[in-house]
Amino acid sequence: MVNYQEPALDRTFAALADPTRRALIARLGAEQDVSVSELARPFTMSLPAVMKHLDVLSDAGLITRTKTGRTVTCRLSAAPMEQAMDWLSRYQRFWSEQLDRLAAFVEEESCSPSPASASGAASPPLPPGSTGPGPIRKK
């Protein structure tokens, strides 16, 4: 039986599933060594709530924390995201190939004339018991 579970990858995706944690990651991607209080400032949640989000990110290996005196600073650690991107890129190739095939099929179908639309083709006869076309309305 194939083992599809990769605990590190699972933790990475679980950590990135939350919008608050993604916002924290984005902030750390833009700035190096940001203090926890600075990271918490834009959010309308308590500092302990932000700390819990930082714990999840740290457990996933997405951030590192350093304490200098009473100040704790955070830094982005992108290695787990690289592993996630490698995993996602396999599926991106699969879907790109599928969509390329679909586009080629649609282009091929739209270029070849269908038998019903050929000019000069006669309409099929009406089934028995049906009336002819209705009156043409004038505008």
Image (cartoon, rainbow, N blue to C red):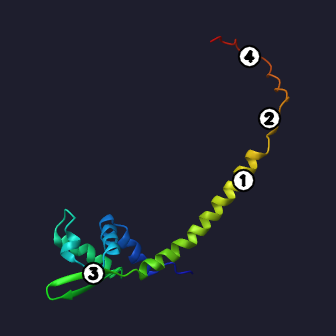
Residue at the far left: name it.
Answer: 70
Q: Earlier in the sequence, mark 2 or mark 3?
A: 3
Tell me the crowding category of disc 2: few under 14, some 14 to 19, or many 20 or more residues within 10 angstroms, Cα based. Answer: few
Spot occupied by residue 109 in the image (x, y as percentages of width and height): 74, 47
Q: Mark 3 points at which residue?
A: 33
Judge left or right: residue 127 versus residue 90.
right
- For label 2, the SS is helix
Q: Mark 1 points at which residue?
A: 105
Q: Earlier in the sequence, mark 4 or mark 2?
A: 2
Spot occupied by residue 132 in the image (x, y as percentages of width and height): 76, 15
Image quarter where the N terminus lies is bottom right
On the image, which quarter does residue 14 sit in?
bottom left
Identity, as a three-letter code, of the amino acid under mark 2:
Ala
Callout 2–callout 3 Cβ contact below 8 Å: no
Q: Which of marks 2 and 1 is nearer the N terminus?
A: 1
Task: Give the CA separation, mark 4 to mark 1.
Answer: 36 Å
Identity, as a three-letter code, of the amino acid under mark 3:
Asp
Who is closer to the viewer here, 86 or 27?
A: 27
Q: Which mark is residue 121?
A: none
Spot occupied by residue 41 in the image (x, y as percentages of width and height): 19, 68
Tell me the crowding category of disc 1: few under 14, some 14 to 19, or many 20 or more residues within 10 angstroms, Cα based. Answer: few
Foreground: disc 4 or disc 2: 2
Q: Which mark is residue 116?
A: 2
Q: Residue 133 carries which label?
A: 4
Callout 4–callout 2 Cβ contact below 8 Å: no
Foreground: disc 4 or disc 1: 1
- For label 3, the SS is loop
